[in-house]
Amino acid sequence: MTDDTPKKRRRKPAEAAAPPSVDLPIDTKAVELRDIAGRLRDLAKMQKRYAARKWQVVGAERDAMDAALKTVGTETEKLIARQVAIETGIEIEAPRQPPAVETHTWDPLEIAVPGEPEYPFGARFRGDQKLLSKRRREFDQCYAAKVNKIAAEAGVGPRHPVYFENLLVVRAEVLADIFWTAERFTEAEDRIKAIESQMAKATDVEARMADADQRTASTLTAIEQRLADEQERFNEADTSHKADLDALKSDISGNLQRIEAGAIEEQRRLAEFASATEARSNELQGRLVETAKLHGADTVALMQRIAELEAKTLELENRPSVDFDVQEETEDEGRFVLRRFFRNGELFKEIRHQTRSPIWRGVHDRNREYQPGDMCTWGGSVWHADKPSIGQIGGDKGWSLMVKKGRDAQ
């Protein structure tokens, strides 16, 4: 049996049409926020690196690090403000400039420098502490005004920053000046003692001169008394012996003339000696007073020091040359250093000292003695000896952990 029912035709499926092209909008805010976040991370790394570097350098390089940190901080603030504005839609107002604060500066014309006061010579020996304190304050005020005026003329104010290392240099110079001045005072005191000793000798000479004058006066008085006695005996003699008396008078007169001439010569010599001694004493006294007034004890000490240095220089120049040599040996892989000092080929000194240089000792051995600087492995970690030790590592036995087990060295 044949089926005469007409068959339906199957339709071919239609081909899928291509979707229409659509331009998707780009979120520019998200892109900008992403860029800002990346830049902020970079700036944070730069700030950390500059801050660490700043404390490792000095001088101009440190100033450069400060400037770089300031630039990074300014850019960071701007990016954060832009980030907040994008996310919230609120523009952050720029920080207002604070009102200018008038800084205290020095005016050279307003600084009055008082006259330099005079040192109170003799006040310390008299015990006049009030005068000493007053003059010291005047000295401090005078030189403080001078220093302030110099700073003002240079354009430096009292709040000008100063590096701590500069303060240390100034402090070191002050301490050195104090020590140097103390040594000069000691030298000046020794010189004064020597001068006082010379003055004591001059006083002894004057005493001897006075004693000589007294003895001369006694001798002349005795001679005059003898002359008076002889004259009296002559007057009592008999006129019958006039010729003998005349002859005797002639002899006595000659003797008296010689004695008087000798006495006159002795007086003249004593007078010359006294005059010369007094003139020399006055000269020494005048020179001491003049030196003390015009130059001070430091000039005398300086001249003495110059003479000593010249003598020492001449002595060193005349010495024969000396040949020095140093030989150095190391022991225990550089742990100990032995130095031998030779002079003209002869050993005159030997020094042996221990260094703290790091030395690798391999695996730790509890029966071995380790010195500071030794390194070894124990328990899979690297340890460093801080002090001499022997025995097990751990606790407070003088060891420091350098590299932990399973960690790379940092």
Image (cartoon, rainbow, N blue to C red):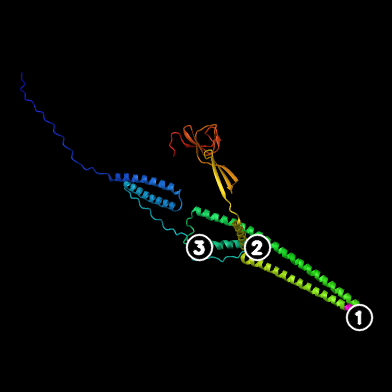
The residue carrying pointer 2 sits among few (fewer than 14), some (14 to 19) or many (20 or more) residues within 10 Å by Cα, namely few
Q: Marks 1 and 3: in contact by CB < 8 Å?
A: no
In the image: residue 197, left or right of residue 257? left
Which residue position holds label 3?
150
Residue 289 tag number: none
Farthest residue in the top direction?
1
Up-down relation of residue 387 to residue 246 (above or below)? above
* Location of residue 316 (image quadrant): bottom right
Q: In which quarter of the image is the N terminus?
A: top left
| Three-letter amino acid code at the position of disc 3 | Ile
| Three-letter amino acid code at the position of disc 2 | Ala
Query: In the rendered structure, which disc, 3 or 2, sits on the residue that comes first in sequence?
Result: 2
Could you tell me what secondary structure mostly forms the magenta stretch? helix
Asked if the stretch drawn in magenta spans residue 245, the answer is: yes
SS category of the residue bearing label 1: helix
Which residue position holds label 1?
243
SS category of the residue bearing label 3: helix
Q: Which residue is depicted at the point 84% across and 73% down? A: 223
